[in-house]
Amino acid sequence: MRKAMSKIVFFCIPAQGHTNPTLGVVRELISMGHQVWYYSYDLLKEKIESAGATFVSCDAYDTQQKLSPKDATKIGKNMAFSIKILVETTLALGDVVCGHMEQLKPDCIVADSMAVWGKAIAVKLGIPFVCSTTTFAFNKYSARIMKQSLKDMLSMVLAMPKVNRQIRRLQENGYPFKNVLDIMQSDENTHTIVYTSPEFQPCADTFSEKYAFVGPSIRPSNSHVEKKKEILVYMSMGTVNNDMLPLYNKCISAFKATDYQLILSVGSLVDIKRLGTLPENISVYSQVDQIAVLKKADVFISHCGMNSVSESLYFGVPLIMLPQPSDQGGVARRVAQLSAGIVVKKRPNAHALLHSVRELAGNPAYKNHAKALSAGFQKCAGAKGAAGKILQVCQSRNP
């Protein structure tokens, strides 16, 4: 007897790093004959549709995209302001999406841990919910890896009256959240997909059986990268805050007189011509196929976004880490804790960069630890396991 087709709705924020891991899961669900709707943003439409989902645009309702450049920099740094933006987006989307959900009658909502509106709508309408976590899963034990400074903690305390006002706005509109943790954190009873391995997740054994650690979602790549030197160093500071011309100049200065090959990905905001004439061992691009490069690389100099770190470790490549926001600091500390990389100061000089790379390339222990984490990633259930978790939740509604 053929199993019934499920209707599944995804919600995500406008970020490549949060969307990309879900696309393999979408493809898996579609290949099994299920229907998927994906609420996201126009810049990601092509990617989402190519995975087979029905794309639904949220751009008209997203408060963050209407912010001034100055206010946009507060997101993730100012807690009260960030919660306000999340709440306003939730309220703007609420009536429209709730109406669509009542017509569609989905079997399950899958929402990114930062896409609060997805969780809020699922809770309000009583639709089975799965949290999609592209960073580390968070509880009181794993929080120790995300250490905060006294300044951060003081800012959080001072922000709470404003945050509580935003919680009341949700309550007044029928969303049953009691406090900020209800919004930002999955409890032990929430079905949660985490795109990392139990070995890399801090305190993995403290999470309930409702957490599925499925490993990173690594897309296939057939691109070819030529390795010209014994040691290939790759540097990228991600796809968002990568306008770092002074840092790229220091990196070029560090490696121009060495026997290392350097591939430098600088993003679209940097005019490559401003980096001057490059020596033959250094190549600079606005964008590269990161998977293809990491297959050949020996060292990765990274901003320490979760996706980049996962891709690096998947291919057994140790890291030199220059973390930017606080969540990247937590990822960097975990890699260093597991001896698969080295954290350097935020504004390293050329000497510090070169010294760190020589330490990493010259000590096989780092490579061995990265390979051990790679083995853990590769034995995870991956997109198939994530799809299975979602369908398990769907079936709980239609036993």
Image: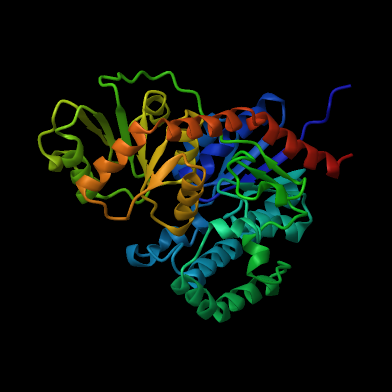
- Above-or-below relation of 246 to 47: below
Question: 141 and 294: which one is in front?
Answer: 141
- Above-or-below relation of 390 to 218: below
Q: Residue at x 10, y 34 (%)?
A: 277
Question: 63 and 332: which one is in front?
Answer: 332
Q: How does the figure colour the protein chain or chains?
A: rainbow
Where residue 201 sits, quadrant-wise, is top right
Residue 52 visible in this rendered orientation of the protein? no
Position of the N terminus, as image quadrant, is top right
Residue 103 visible in this rendered orientation of the protein? yes
Position of the C terminus, as image quadrant, is top right
Where residue 200 sits, quadrant-wise, is top right
Q: Position of residue 73 (x, y in %)?
A: 37, 63
Q: Residue at x 74, y 45 (%)?
A: 108
Where residue 7 sits, quadrant-wise, is top right
Q: Residue at x 36, y 36 (%)?
A: 360
Q: Position of residue 51 (x, y in %)?
A: 56, 30
Q: Residue at x 78, y 54 (%)?
A: 189
- Above-or-below relation of 139 to 381: below
Q: Position of residue 386 (x, y in %)?
A: 68, 36
Question: From the viewer's perspective, is 365 left or right of 8?
Answer: left
Q: Position of residue 194 (x, y in %)?
A: 63, 44
Find the residue positioned furthest to the left. 277
Question: 64 and 135: which one is in front?
Answer: 135
- Above-or-below relation of 38 to 153: above
Question: From the viewer's perspective, is 178 left or right of 328?
Answer: right
